[in-house]
Image: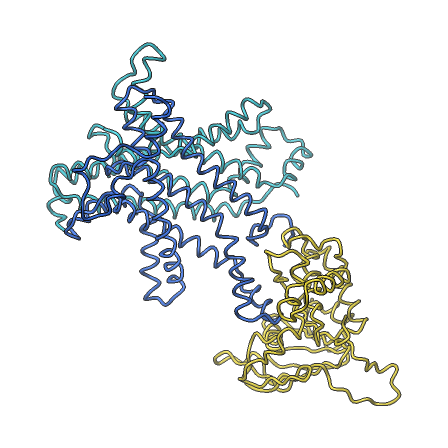
Chain colours: A cyan, B yellow, C blue
Amino acid sequence: MDFGRTVLSEPYLGWLLAGTGMTIAISLVTSLLALAIGSFVSGLRTSGSRLLRGLAILHVQTFRNLPPVPLVLFLVLGLPGAWPQVFGHDFPKGMELQLLLAGLSLNTSGYVAEILRSGLRGVPPSQWDSCRALGLSPVTTRLRVIYPQALRVCLPALGTRLIHNTKNSTIALVIPLSSGSMEVLGQAGRIAGESFAWAEPLVFAALVHLSLAFALSALVNAAARRAQGKVAVAR
Amino acid sequence: MTAACSRSSSSSTSRGPIVVEPVLEARGITRRYGARTVLDGVSFEIPAGTVLALCGASGAGKTTAVRIVAGLLGFDAGELAVGGFRVGAGRPYPRGLFGRIGVVFQEYNLFPHQRALENVRFALRHVRKMERDEATEHARAELARVGLADEAGRLPSELSSGERQRVAIARALALDPYLLLLDEPTSSLDPAAVRGIERLILQLAESGTTMLLVSHNVGFARRAAQRFGLLDAGRLEVSDDARLLDRLAGD
Amino acid sequence: MSAFEVVRRLLVGYPVPDEFVDPAYPELLQRLGGLELTLVVAATSLLLGLPLGALLAVGRQGPALVRWPAVLFVEVVRGLPVMLLVLLFVHLSYPLLGVRVPVALLGTAAFTLHAASYASEIFRSGFRAVGGGVVDAARVLGLSRRQTLVHVELSIAVRTMLPAFLGLLITVFKDTSVLIVVGAAELTCTARQITVSQPVNMLPVLFLLLLMYGGSAALASLLVARLERRWPGADPRNDTKGLP
């Protein structure tokens, strides 16, 4: 194994570091989007409208059951082809990265919605009653009392899913991306394309992912431990 | 059902001293953990139909004593005699003695995957090799005795803490044991259930069940037992006088 | 391309040209495609991965010499994306072994390790579900060691682990879609080939894909629900109704 030639020398090291940054960026953006979409969808689950509830269930079922690879493939490779038939004009070019982000976010959001929903169910019904008895507004009840408790319940599961989301960034490999947008595994492939050495760049990518996974794990555990200290309202 | 437990040697009806073998006799039980001596020459006896309450501060060795009597732990010196079986120091617990002492644990330890009836019935079928119908009837009767006739089909996860402990007691009694060993039976219960279990234990005591009750609740121990043992740093002092327990600071 | 054709292709893939078949390896394996290949890879990975996972779980209970490698192995494999694992297998196999191995086999090997690392965690949770107190209770009731093992320990462990294993099966089944990057003609790859080779609307194919992946998940959920009805009360830590 020759790390000097393939990993630790320029320009390859620069590529790998750029790729690492991209991995982190993709993970961050998709995690935030997934949380946003997931919260919205799980909110729909409790709506009065049957249509909205049904849409929420449809969202969850679709994106949990459809693996991210086919989803991303069809968004990036299939959508631009089908777009003109539906909307008349051409699909904008160069949107591969954005479509990847959309695909990954949607996939994770399905899981997030379910996790948040079970977190909500984990809050004892008596909490809702106590808040009403105290005269708290529905917004205050949710924001200050219910949601923090729900979050405490589902934090570990949420953390695990977001770590999985980080690992999903490697799915970028299934679509053609410009070398500037490649995450770390893609950059490894790029190096291998030039130097014919796969092993060392792969090991670098592996170390990046392991570090990210461990760091995120530690973060989630610390957050979960802190969250245990919070006390529920009334009894 | 508890014929074996309540041997009819009740002193109130005897016409003279009757020498009867105690159900349990412990002589000089010593147990060490490395340099620490957890039990030091512990001796006591439990006559049939009586209740001995073992009290002491935490760490005094109560749990060790219970585990030794139950056969879950060995001991380094002394001798234990239960219902005709002899247990020597460093010797294995006699196989026949397992299932002859009813143990009620602090955390109930019910089989979570079995319903209440099955929990009570299981040993009857698989250890005593009773026929299914006979075992079922026996188990139902025991559950009825602890007041859970209607809960026979429930899983432990569907029962309140008090109900779980009742099932545990029924399970222990179903085997018609020489004596009932209760290790902090109310410590894991929520306060409302404590009184119910205490009442049940008092009922059992009144009906002549031989018991070894380990409890940090001195008040309850006083009501339930006729003889009292105070464990302090491995040493046991036994007395018929409940005032022995006054030495325990606080409750 | 008729709907029937599309479904058929998704199920068995496209025919493999003879030049691509390596006589050193089973021909049948190399001609698999589509859903068939996905199922074979997933099933084989689990069949091999579960025993390996059990070994790892047991290893974690053992002496430090066995425990540390087991822990390291599991944590590393779990921390890596499946895609990376597959690529490692594919690109390191020739340098390390000196022979060219069909991609389907390498993919299966990678997924076996992947499944094993998750399986070891499931086995450990099964061990944990059997609290020591219950074994004590069994012993003082007079149950023999064998009776305790079978009727109490294994019973509780299996009921805890089975739903989790079904979940793992579904996860592995869905994750096989990453094999497209190494050229394995599994379900997703075949779907892609269909939409490229024929001007077929992507939406119906996507829908069928969703059905196939989702159908298995739905089946597993049904099975889990039936199991939980037959074997309730598996995990004592799932208590929410009874007060402690």
Spot occupied by residue C31 in the image (x, y as percentages of width and height): 26, 39
Camera-nearest residue between B42 and C28: C28
Tell me: B74 left or right of C12.
right
Camera-nearest residue between A50 and A140: A50
Quarter of the picture containing the N terminus of chain C is top left
Count of numbered circles in the view: 0
Quarter of the picture containing the C terminus of chain C is bottom right
Spot occupied by residue C110 in the image (x, y as percentages of width and height): 29, 47
Is the residue C185 above or below the residue B119 in the image? above
Camera-nearest residue between A118 and A54: A54
**Who's the residue at 72% across and 69% down the image?**
B218
Q: Quadrant of residue B84?
A: bottom right
**Who's the residue at 33% across and 13% down the image?**
A85
Tell me: B97 left or right of C44.
right
Spot occupied by residue B43 in the image (x, y as percentages of width and height): 65, 84
Is the residue A181 above or below the residue C84 in the image? above
Spot occupied by residue C202 in the image (x, y as percentages of width and height): 34, 22
Is the residue B31 above or below the residue B215 in the image? below
**Who's the residue at 36% across and 41% down the image?**
C39
Camera-nearest residue between C86 and A171: C86
Is the residue B72 above or below the residue C24 in the image? below
Tell me: A114 left or right of C8.
right
